[in-house]
Amino acid sequence: MRPEILNPLFAEPDSLDGVGPKLRKPLEKLRLTRLRDIAYHLPQRFVMRRAVVALDDAAEGEQIVIALTPVEHRAGASARAPYRVLAQDGAGDICALTWFGKASYTARKQLPVGEKRWVAGRLDRYGDMRQMVHPDHIAAESSALAGNLCEPVYPLAEGLTQPRMAGIVAQVLGRLPDLAEWIEPSMLAKQGWPAWRDALIRAHRAEDKAARDRLAYDEIFANALALMLVRQANRRRRGQPLQGDGSLRNRLQLPYSLTAAQARSIAEIAGDMAQDAPMLRLLQGDVGAGKTVVALESMLIAVEAGAQAALLAPTEILARQHFDTIRKLAAPTGVEVALLTGRDKGRARESILMGLMDGSIDIVIGTHAIFQDAVQYRNLGLVVIDEQHRFGVGQRLLLTQKGRVTPHTLAMTATPIPRTLVLAQHGEMDVSRLDEMPPGRQPIDTRVISAARMEDVVAGLARHLATGQQAYWVCPMVRDNETDDIAAAEARFAALQHRFGDAVVLVHGQLPPERKDAAMERFSSGAAKLLVATTVIEVGVDVPNATLMVIEQAERFGLAQLHQLRGRVGRGSEKSTCLLLRGDELSETGRARLALMRESQDGFYLAEQDLELRGGGELLGTRQSGEEAFSIATLEQVTRLIDAANDDARLLMEHDGGLASERGQAARVLLYLLERDWGVSLLRGG
């Protein structure tokens, strides 16, 4: 149960004065659906203004507050012309206050000729006259603008203005309760951080590093504590020790011998599975490092020991691909492998459900359909979760409740995560790393080309397809808006289809599953030569004959995502090429990113570099569809504060009396406040 003291913060915004249905929509667009969300909707930046007595005291481009007296209103000759109010300071110097469009109605009312007004805005010059375009504030009394010398600028949605947002935030800050302190006292004193309530108020009022760091630390600490509770609960749970005898694994006929990293990871997993406590391990593998083989060997250990294994994939495309690969590899062993997705209906589905219940199916591969209520296992011993960042902790827990006892869990990710962040996102897991490539993999020739040379690129693509090889064309992320991404992909598809006809297929996230599968099937079988897609193909598509990857507006992607996309080629014995098409306006970060892609193919190195380049924003440039680890803390703060937060969480749980102590009770409130309460529920349920 959520602590009562937090209930006011989880009220809806229409409990505030002046917030009705009209404002609800823009607030929802910003995901501000409770007062708590508004409290943490921190300013992007602050406008700093200086109060001046005379226009001569201010520099051009400076934000100022000044007393001016209007002397003349000048309407333009047409509706489009600017509306100007000429106003003078105490020394008689003139400044034009200028408005465009409908905003001029305000000027007529607010600035009567001959009456002094206090004006806040940016001082510029137009020709030989000083001017302020659309002043930010106008007041009859100087005291009304006293609070605007340092003004927050908030992220907005259509229908919200800065003053309205500031008013909503002020109401919420007025309702903040006083919460007991959860940070260890000596740590708090050493850092000089304010109390929680003061930190939130200060973070909204000025550029305040101590306040921002305190709020970021709270989030990192809550995350560390929740993950620690998961780990503790896991240790207390009863698992079943599974020890294989090698009888099935010895029958495998792999196309190549295992790398040292694969052999080491399999040994670590086998060691975990032989224990009473359920395994909770993360397998990190760079693109093409052979995670599937490690997963198969792990699943065969479970089957050798008389249990079943389930592999959970985030998309149907990926589930089908895993099914095809694993069924082929496992054929010599004679194990029964089945595929279960949400689309399976009727008799086929019934037969799979029966097979899982009576144990005749050894390994099941599928989407989240494999942990629905109707799916019962005879003895589920191992759960493998692919692309684990796409599933929230809650979904992972659902699966682990499917066994008679808690099954072992192996999570896999192809997104190399910097060492710094492994702990922050997966602190409850042991980690194995596949940091070598299987023999025979050729490096991918990566080139950066200006988008202005589009015709040359398409001509090169035509020559490539004429040789019988296949290619991918990935369309840009358009301002992180999926609808725009799809529009960009459809436009590019139409242009390329005009040139290459039926040899081109299109895949994006909103196509009906059967159309998506049909397109993927045509491409995988070689019937289609060119696949145009949004980033939906980022993970798991494996077509060895595809040896060219074109990524449009490559500068818009994160390094890790570019690396993932590039990893779709270079999967066969032929030489592969990746073309990064860049726009004309490149930021410093964009330029550095593309240069790194040219010089390195090591995903772990690129992930570390990505962390340094970003300093904030989304982790590793992937749009997470599971639970994002951090929304308040930036990457720079996570990197700087994670070790202290982990130490503090450990100190609380091991020496300070855990959640039952006074500080522990305060920390429990924090877990609910920042919605890490799955940690608390595990403590109760475990």
Image: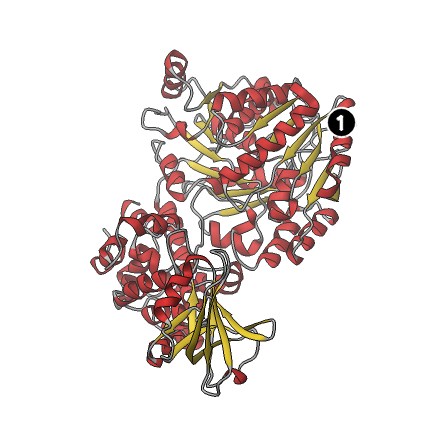
Horizontal relation, residue 560 to residue 274: left or right: right
Q: Quadrant of the C terminus?
A: top left
Q: Residues within 10 Å of mark 1 (few under 14, many from 20)?
A: few
Q: Nearer the viewer, residue 136 or 290?
A: 136
Residue labelled with disc 1: 462
Q: Which residue corresponds to the image point at 36% horizontal and 24% vertical from the top-left? A: 378
| Residue furthest bottom in the image | 91
Where is residue 217? Give x, y as percent.
Answer: 43, 64
Q: Give the percent coordinates (x, y) of residue 681.
A: 29, 48
| 266 relative to 176, above or below | above
Relative to 626, is 209 above or below?
below
* Residue lying furthest left: 4
Where is residue 7? Give x, y as percent.
23, 56
Q: Amino acid at mark 1?
A: Ala
Q: Judging from the image, what secondary structure is the residue with disc 1 in?
A: helix
Task: Give the number of marks.
Answer: 1
* Front-most of residues 416 and 334: 416
Residue at image location 77% in from the left, 31% down from the top: 459
Is residue 85 or residue 13 the one in the foreground?
Answer: 85
Question: What is the basis of the colouring in this image?
Answer: secondary structure
Horizontal side of 489 relative to 396 (left or right) equals right
Say if residue 543 shows up in the picture. Answer: no
Position in image of residue 491 (x %, y %): 60, 32
Furthest residue toward top: 347
Quadrant of the rendered image containing residue 67: bottom left
Is residue 164 something one can see in this rendering?
A: yes
Foreground of the two, 350 or 408: 350
